[in-house]
Image: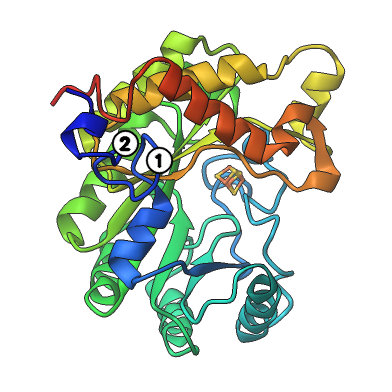
Amino acid sequence: MTPQQDRGGSVFPLADTHKRYNTYDAWLKSTFGGKCAKIPLDAGFTCPNMDGKCGVGGCIYCSGRGSGDFAESPVVPLREQYDRQRELLAKKWPTERCIPYFQARTNTYAPVDVLRPLFEEALTWPAVVGMSIATRADCLPEDTVALLRELSERTVLTVELGLQTVHDRTAALINRGHTYADFLEGYNRLRAGAPRVLVCVHLIFGLPDETEEDMLETVRRVAELRPHQVKLHLLHVLRGTVLGEMYGAGKYTPMEKDAYVETVVKALELLPPDTVIARLTGDGAAQDLLAPAWSRRKREVLNAIDKGLAARDTWQGRKYQR
Ligand code: SF4
């Protein structure tokens, strides 16, 4: 029996739309009562993979703003960043519910006495209903986990962890600066020490030299970890990055749209049905995007994923094995 038959019309049991996966919007609705604006912030952190602690130069695809391309400049005070972004986003979808998103680079890469006032302050801003903090699993020492646990007892706190791949040879190739074992150590410390924190794992498809089977193996291993949320990204080639140079020299070929869609469909089948899918495409800054051009048409990509799931009459979790 498909979820559609099972639920008398709803295609996927946990989505409130025609989607065949557990959507972030449905999660927002069930958690906060409706759509929320996620407000990207740049608190001026650096990254251990940039400052020499575990690497220099950063990941080969990193723009230097560490996925914070939509956040304001770090020289703008955080509250001002929040107010400005909130105003901008209000034009797209007016909402009184906001989630400050510490997005740029590694947002737990500082001592707890530096982190605490930043996070505490954000909780006092108007319309805040939760908080998201993006970081690396190798930047989660015990005292930081204790701080995150405290915060999670006062708000809906999501910690977003970049993993990208479970394959150490790829991690070395992209200059990730940590292994899968390093990731697991931090991930397990966070889950055990801060059980109310919602953990979102980021993965990238299309990393150099990875086959579809490599990507799906990453998904299988992450499925075993049962994260609360997963973000699937397409690898973007951005101007000014090492990957951009590789692309220019013909040493990297980005994924084709059909291959990406096919991989995402298979990945969704492997993920646990209750894992929230927080993203299904990447999001590079348009002015710096060198390739692939098709990734600019995000709506088209999402529609193709919906069609791919429907054409196979499949859905998130169909092949998930506990
Ligand atoms: S971990 Fe993130 S911020 Fe650090 S270099 Fe890689 S992509 Fe950039």
User: In terms of secondary structure, where does tag 2 sit?
Assistant: loop
Image quarter for ligand 1 equals top right
Q: Nearer the viewer, residue 275 or 186?
A: 275
- Given the current orientation, which residue lies at the most extreme front position? 8
* Residue at 67%, 41% in the rendered image: 62
Q: Nearer the viewer, residue 127 or 55?
A: 127
Please name the colour scheme applied to the rendered image. rainbow
Q: Position of residue 176 (x, y in %)?
A: 54, 34
For the residue marked with disc 2, what is the amino acid?
A: Val
Q: Which mark is residue 11?
A: 2
User: In terms of secondary structure, where does tag 1 sit?
Assistant: loop
Q: Quadrant of residue 243?
A: top right
Task: Identify whether 51 is placed above or below 315.
Answer: below
Q: Which residue is mark 1?
A: 18
- Specify few, some or many for label 2: CA neighbours under 10 Å numbering under 14, 14-19, or 20 or more: many
Q: Position of residue 203 (x, y in %)?
A: 46, 34
Q: Position of residue 134 (x, y in %)?
A: 47, 56
Task: Identify whether 260 is placed above or below 84.
Answer: above
Q: Quadrant of the C terminus?
A: top left
Disc on the earlier residue, 1 or 2: 2
Given contact means CB atoms under 8 Å apart, are the residues at marks 1 and 2 in contact? yes
- Mark 1–mark 2 distance (CA, rounded to whole Å): 5 Å
For the residue marked with disc 1, what is the amino acid?
A: His
* Residue at 61%, 39% in the rendered image: 282
Q: In the figure, is residue 18 to the left or right of 205?
A: left
Q: Position of residue 153 (x, y in %)?
A: 22, 76
Q: In the figure, is residue 126 to the left or right of 184?
A: right
- Ligand 1 near label 2 (Cβ, under 8 Å)? no
- Specify few, some or many for label 1: CA neighbours under 10 Å numbering under 14, 14-19, or 20 or more: few
